[in-house]
Amino acid sequence: MFRWPLAVLFMILPFGIQAQPIENTRTPYTLKLVVDEENFFESEIAAGKYVNGQNAVQVYPGESILLEADLKDGKIGTLSCVKENLHPERTITVSFMQHTTGKKHELMMLEVTNPFSERLSYQAGIYLMKSEKWVKTSVLPILPKLKVYETWPDMIVSIALTDWALGDK
């Protein structure tokens, strides 16, 4: 069994000064990922924010969140994590999951839905279990009103999504 200190995984960026709605708070839980038939990864995930600082979004495997965008002059202003999709025309859906076959890790999958009439782009960093560090990864922009599925064969403990933008960058 693998155990990692939460301090390494808890935050990727300092907390923002801006107040976030209560829905932005992750409740503490135990993250468990299948490695193979004999091993698994386990880590205690403390309460924390889904959206930090400058719209940096951090999710762990098994989490699905709704990000409501505050648009200013055709640009993404503030992202807020919400419980209900009351504004589907400006709510981004993010899901991150581990796919397994039996008791063996197969891949990690990120699903992001673009509700906008413009292309949505973002950057991503992944925290790899084997190397115990954050690594930048490539992701595709999402065409209007579509969703994208990104997959990795690696064991990813957490993913950080930043630099959200609409239109051609």
Image (spheres, helix red, strand yellow):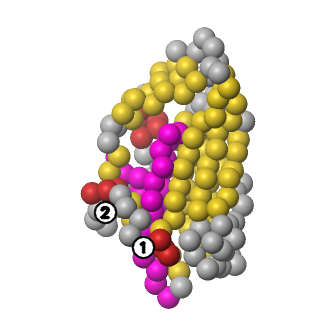
In the image, what residue type sits under mark 1? His
Q: Position of residue 37 (x, y in %)?
A: 63, 14
- SS for dot 1: loop
* Relative height, residue 26 to residue 119 (above, below): above
Q: Quadrant of residue 105?
A: top right
Q: Quadrant of residue 143?
A: bottom right
Q: Is residue 102 visible?
A: yes
* Relative height, residue 49 to residue 41 (above, below): below
Q: Position of residue 63 (x, y in %)?
A: 47, 44
Q: Image point 42% across, 73% down: which residue? A: 87
10 Å crowding of disc 1: few (<14), some (14-19), many (20+): few
Front position in the image: 12 or 167:
167
Q: Position of residue 89 (x, y in %)?
A: 50, 75
Q: Is residue 2 left or right of residue 68?
A: right
Q: Position of residue 34 (x, y in %)?
A: 58, 24
Q: Is residue 151 left or right of residue 165?
A: right
Q: Quadrant of residue 112?
A: bottom right
Q: Which residue is mark 1?
A: 87
Q: Image point 61% across, 49% down: which residue? A: 110
Q: Is residue 28 left or right of residue 169?
A: left
- Disc number at residue 20? 2
Residue at the bottom extreme of this rendering:
73
Magenta residues (range): 47-73
In the image, what residue type sits under mark 2? Gln
- Disc number at residue 49? none
* Relative height, residue 26 to residue 100 (above, below): below
